[in-house]
Amino acid sequence: MARSSLALAALVAVVLATAGCTASGDGAQPAGVSSSPTPSTAGGLQALPPTIVSPGELDGTDVAVVVGTALVIAVDDGTEDQWTGTTTDPAIAEFSAGGSDEGATFRPGFEARKIGSTQAKLTGPDGREIAFTLSVVAP
């Protein structure tokens, strides 16, 4: 009986000792909470949201987008895959086609790749072209 009590006490001590351990090293994280980094918290950075605009807001404007994010075009439902686009410098920003994939619908847009400015053109399903300047800026 004394042997099983000792084993139980040792087991409880081990559980209590390890319950307060965290991988973060600062001791501020409660036990039972995962400390593995997520895309929004890795390296202390938070993911920034995309810039969302309608096609009518773009014509002839200069749109600023934070590097590493996207300019998402809020197009009419059902037309997502009918929009095309180009930039004069794809190293700064590149068009990303919209459409459906495995039940998810994606809006067309431009991915902001590096800081700089480029001319961009968006063409709608009716053939209308919308020209604007896309400036990729630091966060």
Image (spheres, rainbow, N blue to C red):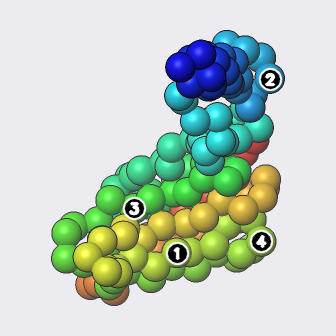
Look at the numbered discs 3 and 2 and tell me whether their residues touch, using CB distance below 8 Å: no
Relative to 50, say whether 125 is above or below.
Answer: below
Measuring from the top left, give residue 97's x and y in whole percent: 46, 79
Within 10 Å of disc 2 (Cα), the crowding (few <14, some 14-19, many 20+) is few
Say which label, 3 or 4, has the lower sequence index. 3
| Badge 2 amino acid | Gly
Relative to 58, say whether 25 is above or below.
Answer: above
Q: Give the camera-side residue of 87 and 74.
A: 74
| Badge 4 amino acid | Ala
Say which label, 3 or 2, has the lower sequence index. 2
Q: Quadrant of residue 37?
A: top right
Q: Which mark is residue 25?
A: 2
User: What is the distance, in whole Å, between disc 3 and disc 2 at their CAs?
Assistant: 42 Å
**53 horizontally vs 95: left or right:** left
Which quadrant would the C terminus be assigned to in this image? top right
**129 horizontally vs 90: left or right:** left
Q: Name the residue under label 1.
A: 96
**88 horizontally vs 64: left or right:** right
Look at the numbered discs 1 and 3 and tell me whether their residues touch, using CB distance below 8 Å: no
Q: Mark 4 points at which residue?
A: 91
Q: Which mark is residue 88?
A: none
Q: Give the camera-side residue of 32 and 78.
A: 32
Look at the numbered discs 2 and 1 and tell me whether their residues touch, using CB distance below 8 Å: no
Q: Residue 73 carries which label?
A: 3
Within 10 Å of disc 1 (Cα), the crowding (few <14, some 14-19, many 20+) is some
Measuring from the top left, give residue 109's x and y in whole percent: 48, 67
Look at the numbered discs 4 and 1 and tell me whether their residues touch, using CB distance below 8 Å: no
Disc 1 element: strand
Q: Quadrant of residue 72?
A: bottom left
User: What is the distance, in whole Å, between disc 2 and disc 1 at their CAs?
Assistant: 40 Å
